[in-house]
């Protein structure tokens, strides 16, 4: 007896097996796969967005920390040197005001102690005129045991080759007096534009921008606050910097930092 099946039965079995092999996804299966893919893709996008925001926030904080440190260090260096190469007891070197802080300094360490009395002179030979070069005026500290005082004289020129100071008018100096080249610096904050200005005799420059606070407090040896340079021992300097674009909870991202320091050149 032959083991081969009937030809019609073979065709039916082949057709049935071919149909099973070509069977695809149903509509419900396709919908489930699409929904699952959308959920996974959305989760990945949210994770990526969260990571990007976190990185941007950290980058902004690092930038703020760097900015506030730079500004604070610059100001600290300026104010710590208050009184350098200046009379200690008899001049108001640092003057806090309602809208600014005024610092009188001698940035080139230019000073000349007078050793002999000289009357009605228009030029003066000194040991080294180089530190006086570039100044148009000179401050004359008149030593008086009872009431020391200042005179200010205009310079017409500084001859560095011959170490000579030339004055615009005749002056008189006495032994024990000191001639100084001083510069008046005024630090002020423009709250509207958030600029911290350094105002000099020759004009104003912007020290930093995006500054929302600039404040100083001065303390005596006993820890009480003061505005008198003769009593100042330490200073607390605070600066707050805000990010120009980044915000947190609807408000500008800010970083506030304070620094306490001693005046290096104060003599007590």
Image (cartoon, grey):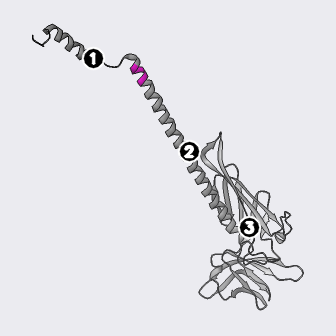
> Of the numbered discs in the image, which one, if any, rests on residue 54?
2
Query: For mark 3, what is the residue?
Result: 261
The image position of residue 71, as x and y in percent, is: 65, 60
Q: Nearer the viewer, residue 230 or 13?
A: 13
**Image location of residue 131, percent across then percent down:** 64, 80
Q: Nearer the viewer, residue 73 or 138?
A: 73
Does 43 sit above or below residue 96?
above
Q: Residue at x 62, y 82 (%)?
A: 130
In primary-sequence order, the first of circles 2 and 1 is: 1
Q: CA distance from mark 2 to mark 1?
A: 52 Å
Image coordinates of residue 212 in percent, x first then y, are: 69, 51
Q: Which residue is mark 1?
A: 20
Of labels 2 and 1, the one closer to you = 1
Q: Which quadrant of the view contains residue 169?
A: bottom right
| Residue at image point 77% right, 57% down | 99
**Helix, strand or loop at disc 3?**
strand
| Residues shaded magenta | 29-33
Magenta segment: does it hold 264? no
Q: Residues within 10 Å of mark 3 (few under 14, many from 20)?
A: some
Around disc 1, counting alpha carbons within 10 Å, would you say few (fewer than 14), some (14 to 19), or many (20 or more)?
Answer: few
Instruction: Locate the N terminus and report the quarter of the image it occupies.
Output: top left
Q: Which is more N-terminal, label 2 or label 3?
A: 2
Looking at the image, which residue sits at the far front? 1
Give the quarter of the figure containing the C terminus: bottom right
């Amino acid at each position: 007896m032959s083991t081969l099946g009937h030809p019609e039965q073979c065709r039916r079995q082949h057709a049935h097996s071919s149909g099973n092999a070509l069977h695809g996804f149903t509509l419900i299966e396709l919908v489930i796969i699409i929904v699952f893919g959308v959920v996974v893709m959305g989760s990945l996008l949210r994770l990526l967005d969260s990571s990007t925001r976190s990185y941007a926030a950290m980058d902004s904080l690092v930038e703020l920390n760097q900015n506030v440190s730079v500004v604070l260090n610059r100001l600290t260096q300026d104010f710590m040197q208050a009184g350098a190469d200046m009379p200690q007891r008899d001049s108001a070197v640092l003057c806090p005001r309602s809208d600014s802080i005024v610092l009188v300094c001698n940035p080139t360490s230019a000073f000349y102690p007078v050793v002999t009395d000289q009357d009605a002179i228009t030029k003066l030979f000194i040991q080294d005129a180089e530190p006086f070069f570039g100044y148009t005026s000179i401050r004359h500290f008149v030593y008086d045991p009872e009431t020391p005082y200042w005179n200010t004289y205009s310079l017409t020129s500084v001859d560095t080759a011959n170490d000579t100071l030339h004055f615009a008018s005749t002056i008189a100096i006495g032994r024990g007096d000191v001639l100084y080249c001083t510069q008046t610096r005024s630090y002020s904050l423009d709250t509207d534009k958030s600029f911290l200005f350094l105002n000099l005799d020759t004009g104003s420059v912007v020290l930093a921008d995006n500054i929302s606070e600039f404040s100083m407090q001065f303390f005596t040896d006993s820890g009480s606050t003061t505005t008198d340079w003769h009593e100042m021992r330490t200073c607390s300097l605070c600066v707050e910097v805000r990010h120009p674009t980044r915000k947190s909870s609807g408000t500008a991202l800010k970083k506030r930092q304070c620094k306490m320091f001693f005046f290096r050149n104060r003599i007590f």
